[in-house]
Amino acid sequence: MAVGIALVTIAWLGMRSQRGPAPTQSRRYAGTPSELLEDSLHAAERVRQWQRSFAFASELSGREPRNARYLLLLAQSWNNLAWGGSAFGRERAPLRTSSARVRAFGRALTLLDSASGLARDPATYGQICLRVGQIYETEGLPIDALVVYQAGLVHVPEDSLINLRAAWVMSQLNDPLRSDAERGHPVRRSVR
């Protein structure tokens, strides 16, 4: 019996290795230029079609796995999927407060960590720091977010968005009981 299972396993592994590695590009977008895919990704994000933007980002990062900007786009797609889920008609995301949502944020953080190691220009590095900090903020880790923002400012001191986020987190930590209106920030109201 054990010999039979071993033979079947060996045959299965042999057939599997003959197929070769999985292709990095999908056949659906094989002839599409990367610039067009990136534009399509941004258009899909504007209309909150998270599944489509995720497909475009996956294709781009599959074509150039060492491109920090494409890894950033894929991480942003994971983040959007965690917030927006795959259903568009609901106000609350299906992944909200679930382990799937936490895993999606984890994947986004992993991709952002890889992208930060590959980033060569300061603008991309600044965007990566901003995204990591925002994920930490949404996960309820403001001190970690502040540490990321301050580390980002060491590399990109002129980045005004990172400066603003760091100041916002610092004001929240200094006086957590003050409302947004008392800080002079507009209050966001959800539409029902």
Image (cartoon, grey):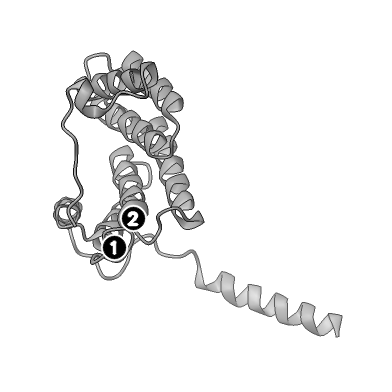
Please give the name of the residue rendered at 72% of the width and 82% of the height, measured from the top-left corner. Answer: 8
Q: Position of residue 140 (x, y in %)?
A: 43, 36
* Residue designated by label 2: 81
Q: Looking at the picture, which amino acid does disc 1 mark?
A: Gln
Mark toward the start of the polypeptide (2 vs 1): 1
Residue 169 versus residue 49: which sits nearer the camera? 169
Determine whether the residue tagged by mark 1 lies in a helix, strand or loop. Answer: helix
Q: Quadrant of the C terminus?
A: bottom left
Residue at (25% x, 57% y) in the render: 53
Q: Position of residue 26 (x, y in %)?
A: 32, 66
Residue 25 coordinates in the image, percent (x, y): 33, 62
Discs 2, 1 touching: Cβ within 8 Å = yes
Q: Amino acid at mark 2?
A: Leu
Q: Residue at x 37, y 31 (%)?
A: 133
Judged from the image, the secondary structure of the residue bearing numbered disc 2 is helix
Q: Is residue 185 above or below residue 103?
A: above
Q: Taking 121 as reference, is 150 above or below it?
A: above
Q: Residues within 10 Å of mark 2 (few under 14, many from 20)?
A: many
- At horizontal 40% and vertical 24% (from top left) the residue drawn is 148
Examine the image and state in which quarter residue 1 appears.
Answer: bottom right
Q: Nearer the viewer, residue 43 or 186?
A: 186
Compared with 99, 159 (above or below) is above
Is residue 64 visible in the rendered image? The answer is no
Q: Label 1 crowding class (10 Å Cα cut-off): few <14, some 14-19, many 20+?
A: some
Most foreground residue, 81 or 12: 81
In the figure, is residue 35 to the left or right of 146? left
Q: State left or right for residue 175 relative to residue 15.
A: left
Q: Position of residue 184 (x, y in %)?
A: 17, 22
Disc tally is 2
Seen from the viewer's position, the closer of residues 182 and 164 is: 182
* In this picture, residue 108 sits left or right of residue 125: right
The residue carrying mark 1 is 51
